Image (cartoon, grey):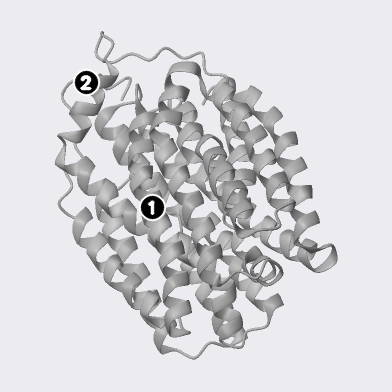
Amino acid sequence: MSRRAWMMFACGVVVVLVANGLRQSLGLFLRPVSTELDLGRQYFGLVIAVQALVYGLSQPLVGLAADRLGAARVIVAAFLLYGTGLWLASTSVTGLEMLGSLGLVVGLALAGTTQVVVLGAVGRVVSNRRRGIVFGTVIASGSLGMFIMVPAVQAGLEMVGWRDTLLVLAVVMVLVSVFSVGLVDDQPHSVSGRTQSIREAIREASGHRGYLLLTAGFFVCGFHVTFIATHLPAYLADRGVSPSVGAVAFGVIGLANIAGAYLFGALGDRYRKKSLLTFLYLGRAVVMVGILLFPMTDRSAVAFGIVLGLLWLGTVPLTSGIVVQVFGTRYFSMLFGMVMLGHQLGGFTGAWLGGVIYDLTGSYDLMWVFSVILGLTAAALHWPINDRPLARLDIRTA
């Protein structure tokens, strides 16, 4: 890659590491926030579900803004909003205030600070044959962030409480916004010698059966990861795992996904991405059956964290890789943002439904059963996807 491409890649890694790392650590706030504000787990689950929904609904428009205005402007504005949302959450005294800050404001900020905008910028300066490993590395950085953030957040909760921890994190978000400068995009966006309109791009994608299947399958990914990120710490505590070991098991998901996302991204450059996605979702279903059937101890909790981490976000470099492979780079952020909307609708369902089922039954077992069924469904959806590039694409800009 060129020096410019390396600079964009490095800044993109930092952006995703911090923004996505914190997003996947918010489940640690479930118990202290629910206890102090006298909220049920269902309500905190709703907060994270609304966050996921707003994140998803905003993705296509934020992606389009990045395609038109550049990633750097979108990212710096989003990080400032991220910090504002965390600060407001730290001052919340009612469930409604928490819903507005950690749910609505942070959800909107996430749309501009995580993978869609960053991958759109970086994807334009790397060739198609290397995008898998580059995208996988960027996604892996989010998991490295999770591995760093989880113990840091847990330590903050134990030392200064959840309010001051959120306040410190708000300052961190504002400081990290400076890395958006490295993602200024001055590359030309061309498609087969002419400019494709937004309407044409949307019509083309919405009429592509593979794109629709990919979006439906990504719903399942969102369901899985948001349910687990929101409820796993509490689930492990319910099963007798100590909070410190639970934090390790939760954090090791991020550590293992550094290897998993990188591996699946690299494999996506050599093998058909849709086949790898089928395998990945089948693997998730098998692991979740194991969580239901095997006793949960400190050792098994960490072991399950490792295996879940290997399968955690390996879906993202593969899914985004199919989008850019089929449709090209011109409106990648917008089109992948629409796929991410499916992911976040799944995230809304997973976070909220997990809380509902727990409050109604006193257990997460039924939620794990649903997760297994959805994993098998996603595997079946990805197998028939047509992942061939469209005939209009110039191979140099695909």
Between label 2 and label 1, give the one nearer the viewer.
2
For label 2, the SS is: helix
Q: Can residue 272 be seen in this view?
A: no
- To which residue does mark 1 refer? 315
Q: Where is residue 231 in the image (x, y as percent from the top left)?
A: 53, 70
In the rendered image of this protein, does residue 160 appear above or below residue 76?
below
In the rendered image of this protein, does residue 359 appear above or below residue 101?
below
Spot the residue most to the right. 159
State if disc 1 and disc 2 touch (CB < 8 Å): no
For label 1, the SS is: helix
In the rendered image of this protein, does residue 47 appear above or below residue 214?
below
- Callout 1 amino acid: Thr
Q: Position of residue 291 (x, y in %)?
A: 44, 81
Does label 2 or label 1 sit earlier along the sequence?
2
Point 45% across, 36% down: residue? 116
182 or 44: nearer the viewer: 44
Point 67% across, 61% down: residue? 150
Query: Which disc is residue 200 wearing?
Result: 2
179 or 63: nearer the viewer: 63
Q: Where is residue 76 in the image (x, y as percent from the top left)?
A: 63, 28
Point 45% across, 23% down: residue? 65
- Callout 2 amino acid: Glu
Cα distance, mark 2 to mark 1? 27 Å
Q: Position of residue 297 (x, y in %)?
A: 58, 88
Q: Is residue 37 visible?
A: yes
Q: How crowded is mark 1: few (under 14 residues within 10 Å), some or many (20 or more)?
A: many
Point 78% across, 65% down: residue? 155
Left of 252 or right of it: where is 378?
Answer: left
Left of 186 or right of it: where is 357?
Answer: left
Left of 188 or right of it: where is 6?
Answer: right
Spot the residue most to the top. 193
